[in-house]
């Protein structure tokens, strides 16, 4: 008698249905439809109409209060808030994937990050003479705010004009004020994460005017955690998922860095990264069947980012990394999610599996707009190799101020063997997760469509007529499995010659109301390396 095939949480008393469990390289488990939406989790400003109910309401194209455009995001979440800017970055690249958002209540206590710089000018009585020129302030990698400087402008006048022009761009994540010759730039939303906003003051032309800060600089003094807000928002998403909602990608404001880390939040058992991971790993169990993923970003040091990876170590979480990128981690993750979901569409094709050097070829370049860091930061070849082996998707800096994504990987890079932790790269390719998820979703859907409300019968022997309608046998279920395997093989996503001989389909003896299936899914490998050896011999 064959050994029973068991799924976690599925037994004789489980409600009727078609359940799927997906064991990836390190036994991470777990239905979706042919639509794979994204959901953003981030802080909002107090001027947004959604502020009062933050954490308790999901907004999207088909919700009671719709969120279908950037203008909707501004009205709901406040112009320049983290949630607005992330959604705007996504919609600028991807105009087809359904976008949902849940505001995360900001830190209940804390401060907003800020920075100050002082203007020095010779003005009317200047010596040497001051000439007309141009000052620009770049915030969060956005189009710079520029200020014309006259030959007789005083430092106070210039500082006041800088503050006025910054405040004139409501889509920036900061406000500004001027006191005499000093400009103070302050984040619109409080919390320690606002320290990732970069400000770059620079004198473009003219003489006689200087700024006390003239390099890309992170803001400071932001304090406060929104971990409690994440608990509220994630509970809402879990309830939404249980009632039929489905968001394939979570894009959180929480970063893969020393600010959010993994369990780095004082006063809370878990930080946002670990809270999100825990929810994904729970909802993907067969009883829920929501196989979802999270895309994080880090602009922190390599070592800080790796620390979070080793703690997380989950194939359902990914982190893209570019040290000192000039945009916040939230917008960085949003840009990457937008690019990924443009190509990773249903029905899945090989174009949505391999993202090597994304942004560096003619097809993908128009979907990737991350400039190289203004301070000249660029990872070394060793940094890139270390990042990939540590579960980070690194960004390469190329000529002309451009970048591309070297390789898209999952955060799973280790496993525990006895008392030791060793490297484990079986599910390092993110495309393997994508293929596996889509395959199981299609298999569940097709079985559900073909055999609703059936009774189980014995497989007919050779020469007997086919089973009558409203009945099903193990052989018919096997035929559906083989059909889906062949569909994915014809799309060059899996190796049918390895899969089909290993497929097991059987009616269980306890309970006898179950037909179980086990599929060894051999996904096709991505091309990562072409090794060329040229021997000149004459």
Image: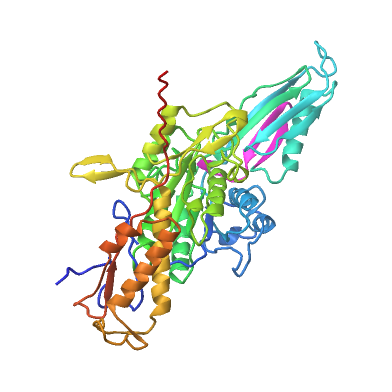
> Which quadrant of the rendered structure holds the N terminus?
bottom left
Vertical relation: 203 (above or below) 521: above
| Viewer can see residue 411 | yes
What is the x, y in percent for residue 462? 25, 82
Q: Is residue 277 left or right of residue 360?
A: left
> Which quadrant of the rendered structure holds the C terminus?
top left
The question of residue 405 being in magenta is answered with: no
What is the x, y in percent for residue 336? 54, 46
Q: Is residue 209 left or right of residue 385?
A: right
Residue toward you, 37 or 156:
37
The residue stretch that appears in magenta: 174-193
Residue toward you, 148 or 467:
467
The question of residue 180 being in magenta is answered with: yes
Q: Is residue 205 left or right of residue 436?
A: right
Vertical relation: 235 (above or below) 305: below
Vertical relation: 37 (above or below) 455: above
Q: Which residue is located at x 29 percent, y 69 percent?
A: 517
């Amino acid at each position: 008698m064959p050994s029973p095939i068991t799924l976690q949480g599925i037994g004789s008393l489980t409600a009727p249905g078609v359940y799927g469990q997906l064991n990836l390289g390190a036994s991470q488990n777990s239905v979706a439809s042919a639509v794979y939406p994204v959901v953003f989790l981030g802080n909002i400003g107090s001027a947004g109409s959604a502020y009062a109910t933050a954490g308790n309401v999901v907004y999207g194209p088909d919700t009671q209060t719709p969120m279908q455009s950037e203008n909707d995001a501004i009205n709901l979440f406040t112009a320049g808030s983290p949630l607005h800017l992330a959604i705007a970055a996504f919609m600028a690249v991807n105009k087809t994937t359904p976008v949902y958002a849940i505001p995360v209540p900001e830190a209940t206590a804390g401060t907003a990050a800020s920075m100050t710089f002082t203007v020095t000018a010779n003005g009317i009585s200047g010596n040497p003479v001051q000439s007309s020129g141009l000052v620009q302030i770049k915030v969060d990698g956005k189009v710079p705010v520029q200020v014309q400087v006259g030959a007789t402008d005083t430092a106070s006048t210039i500082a006041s004009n800088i503050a006025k022009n910054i405040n004139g761009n409501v889509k920036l994540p900061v406000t500004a004020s001027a006191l005499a010759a000093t400009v103070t730039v302050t984040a619109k939303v409080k919390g320690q994460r606002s320290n990732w906003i970069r400000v770059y003051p620079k004198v473009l032309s003219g003489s006689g005017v200087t700024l006390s800060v003239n390099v890309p600089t992170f803001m400071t003094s932001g304090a406060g955690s929104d971990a409690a807000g994440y608990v509220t928002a994630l509970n809402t998403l879990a309830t939404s998922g249980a009632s039929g909602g489905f968001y394939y990608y979570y894009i959180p404001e929480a970063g893969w860095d020393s600010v959010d880390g993994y369990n780095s939040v004082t006063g809370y058992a878990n930080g946002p990264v670990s809270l999100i991971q825990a929810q994904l790993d729970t909802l993907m169990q067969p009883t829920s069947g929501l196989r979802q993923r999270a895309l994080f970003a880090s602009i922190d040091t390599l070592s800080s980012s790796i620390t979070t990876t080793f703690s997380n170590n989950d194939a359902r979480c990914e982190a893209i990394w570019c040290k000192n990128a000039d945009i916040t981690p939230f917008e960085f993750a949003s840009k990457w999610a937008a690019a990924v979901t443009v190509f990773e569409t249903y029905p899945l094709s090989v174009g949505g599996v391999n993202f090597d050097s994304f942004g560096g070829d003619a097809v993908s370049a128009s979907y990737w707009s991350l400039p190289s860091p203004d301070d000249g930061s660029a990872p070394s070849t060793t940094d890139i190799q270390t990042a990939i082996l540590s579960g980070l998707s690194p960004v390469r800096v190329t000529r002309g101020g451009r970048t591309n994504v070297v390789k898209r990987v999952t955060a799973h890079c280790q496993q525990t063997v006895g008392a030791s932790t060793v490297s484990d790269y079986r599910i390092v390719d993110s495309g393997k997760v994508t293929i596996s998820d889509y395959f199981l979703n299609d298999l569940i859907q097709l079985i559900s469509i073909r055999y609703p409300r059936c009774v189980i019968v014995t497989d007919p022997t050779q020469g007997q007529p086919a089973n009558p309608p409203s009945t099903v046998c193990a052989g018919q279920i096997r035929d559906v499995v083989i059909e889906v395997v062949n569909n994915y093989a014809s799309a060059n996503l899996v190796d049918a010659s390895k899969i089909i001989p290993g497929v097991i389909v059987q009616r269980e003896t306890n309970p006898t109301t179950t037909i179980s299936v086990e599929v060894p899914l051999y996904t096709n490998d991505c091309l990562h390396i072409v090794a060329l050896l040229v021997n000149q011999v004459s």
